[in-house]
Amino acid sequence: MLAMATTAHTRRLAAAAALAAAVCFVELAAAWLAHSVALLADAGHVAVDVLGLLVAALAARQATRRPRGRQTYGYHRVGVLVALANALVLLAVVGGVAVLAALRLRHPGHPAAPLMLGAAGVGILANGLVAVWLRRDRSLNVRAAVLHAVSDAVAGLAVVVAAVVILLTGWVVVDPLLSLLIAAVIAAMALPMVREGVGVLLEAVPPGVALADVEAEILATAGVVAVHDLHVWGITAEHRVLSCHLAVAEQGLGEAEHLVRDLSDRLCDRFQLRHTTIQVETCHPCPPDLCADDGVAQHNHPHPASTGAAAGHS
């Protein structure tokens, strides 16, 4: 079932890439004939989309590969790397568009407004269709592809506005002015994707999760004396992971296993932490001055008296 879903997902991405390639060709030809920098900017953006969608399809396929060898978590982060690369390339394209638009402000051309209007309309319809195809997938990788499609539609709308203004007033400076607006809007949409991708790669606490709340939930567990070496991060934006050491009161192994299972279920339900690794220890908290700071966040660091078994949940 998973393989069938993955195949269908990959086919949707490939179809979206083919549609984007057709739009890119139409807009490039129209930009050349119409002498429109706004339309050229949109065409360049669509060209990046084609590559992004193709690589997104590859990343979606890679993410289903089973863990093996050195990749003990599998290949889920291929999608994160692709999304981050897409967003960075998009920002580079934005920079190029801004420079070209600034040059055109000094030397305005004479864009052919009817051709701009037709080509932009085709782009808006095509990118709207791509966004609808991919809207249900919430992975960071595909969200980056949807971001490209939505920003393309926004850029196309700006081109339509420019064409209408030129048709009604003859004010050709609107073409580079709206190109700068397109660049600003696209940059505003891409920067959050860059921040999220970098956060995943740096193994930061996922957005929407407060480490203090996680710690409080753990300490509210009956029998837990303290928690240390608490870490929460994401393999991807959707695949959240926790590991920690628990200091517990003296108890049998069976009781400790039930404690860990109950805690893991609660952490999954409340924080969507679907993979937890919890080591149980019978320990006594140490004085603060004996807990050296080694550069890693520590929480209620105990002094181990004995060590129990590690337990995991996924």
Image: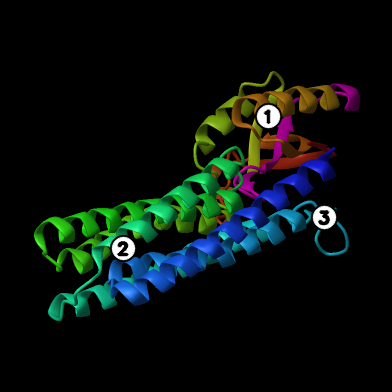
For the residue pair 291 and 146, the one nearer the viewer reads as 146
Range shown magenta: 230-255
The answer to if 233 sits in the magenta stretch is: yes
Read off the residue under disc 2.
116
Seen from this angle, which residue lies furthest top?
Answer: 222
Quadrant of the frame with the C terminus: top right
Amino acid bearing label 1 = Cys
Mark 1 = which residue?
Answer: 268
The residue to which callout 3 is attached is: 65
117 in the magenta segment: no
| Callout 2 touching callout 3 (CB < 8 Å) | no
How far is mark 3 from mark 1, CA to CA? 24 Å
Front-most of residues 185 and 282: 185
Q: Are marks 1 and 2 in contact (CB under 8 Å)?
A: no
Q: Amino acid at mark 2?
A: Met
Relative horizontal placement of residue 210, taking residue 15 as reference (left or right): left
Q: From what the image shows, is residue 203 above or below residue 287? A: below
Image x and y of residue 40, in percent: 36, 71
Q: Residue at x 11, y 64 (%)?
A: 170
**Residue 283 vertical placement versus 172 (above, below):** above
Name the element at disc 3. loop
The quadrant holding residue 221 is: top right
User: Residue 235 appears at what percent x and percent y?
Assistant: 67, 50
